[in-house]
């Protein structure tokens, strides 16, 4: 058998498995574990924020990050109008914070300890790290807006002993012992 024949025998036809609907798409993407953040801002009257798991780094030079938000969000337009925001990377102990900021029509900041960053954005107490950003660009993509932020300052909680809050398969998860670790 030639090399080409071997390769063709190893290929599988995936078209029969490619049923694409919103549920299968959501389930497939749920297999990608992600951290949880709260995107926050302050409009001069009150703190604003929402839970966001679609967050990632874009560039080291210049330091850029990105997050996606539903185009129908009522909170993001108020943050957008300020031109700036903070990203609060939640710790495992902040599951209730994530749930609270994911709710619509409630006082998301009720009972939440926070302080103002140098960039005048809310930083939630106990986050693993936070980033102060200004909006560099926005792109409409389907039912979401992709926001690019230039990072102006970073900070961290004093206690780094906690793990990040992780989301996988539609639920919060805990990290296991790192590979290659003895404990």
Image: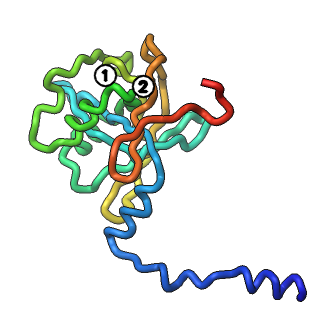
Percent coordinates x, y for residue 124 in the rendering = 31, 22
Residue 124 is labelled as: 1
- Is 38 or 141 nearer to us in this picture? 38
- Is 176 or 103 nearer to us in this picture? 176
Residue shown at 56%/34% (left/top)?
63
- Left or right placement of residue 12 versus residue 174 in this view: right
Q: Which residue is mark 2?
A: 130
Residue shown at 33%/22% (left/top)?
123
Any part of residue 136 in sight: no
Q: How many marks?
A: 2
- Left or right placement of residue 66 versus residue 93 in this view: right
Percent coordinates x, y for residue 167 in the rendering = 39, 44
Residue lying farthest to the right in this orientation: 2
- Against 4, residue 124 (above or below) is above
- Is 92 or 64 nearer to us in this picture? 92
Percent coordinates x, y for residue 86 in the rendering = 37, 30
Disc 2, SS: strand
Percent coordinates x, y for residue 156 in the rendering = 46, 18
């Amino acid at each position: 058998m030639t090399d080409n024949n071997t390769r063709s025998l190893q290929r599988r036809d995936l078209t029969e498995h490619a049923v694409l609907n919103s549920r299968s798409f959501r389930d497939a993407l749920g297999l990608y574990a992600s951290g949880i953040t709260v995107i926050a801002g302050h409009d001069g009257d009150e703190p604003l924020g929402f839970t966001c798991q679609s967050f990632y780094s874009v560039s080291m030079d210049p330091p850029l990050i990105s997050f996606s938000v539903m185009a129908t969000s009522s909170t993001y337009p108020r943050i957008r109008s300020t031109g700036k925001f903070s990203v609060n990377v939640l710790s495992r102990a902040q599951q209730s914070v994530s749930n609270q900021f994911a709710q619509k029509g409630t006082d998301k900041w009720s009972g939440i300890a926070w302080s103002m960053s140098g960039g005048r954005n809310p930083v939630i107490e106990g986050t693993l790290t936070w980033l102060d950003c200004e909006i560099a660009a926005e792109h409409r993509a389907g039912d979401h807006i992709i926001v690019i932020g230039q990072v102006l300052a970073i900070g961290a909680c004093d206690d780094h002993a906690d793990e990040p809050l992780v989301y996988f398969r539609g639920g919060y998860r805990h990290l296991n012992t790192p590979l290659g670790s003895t404990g």
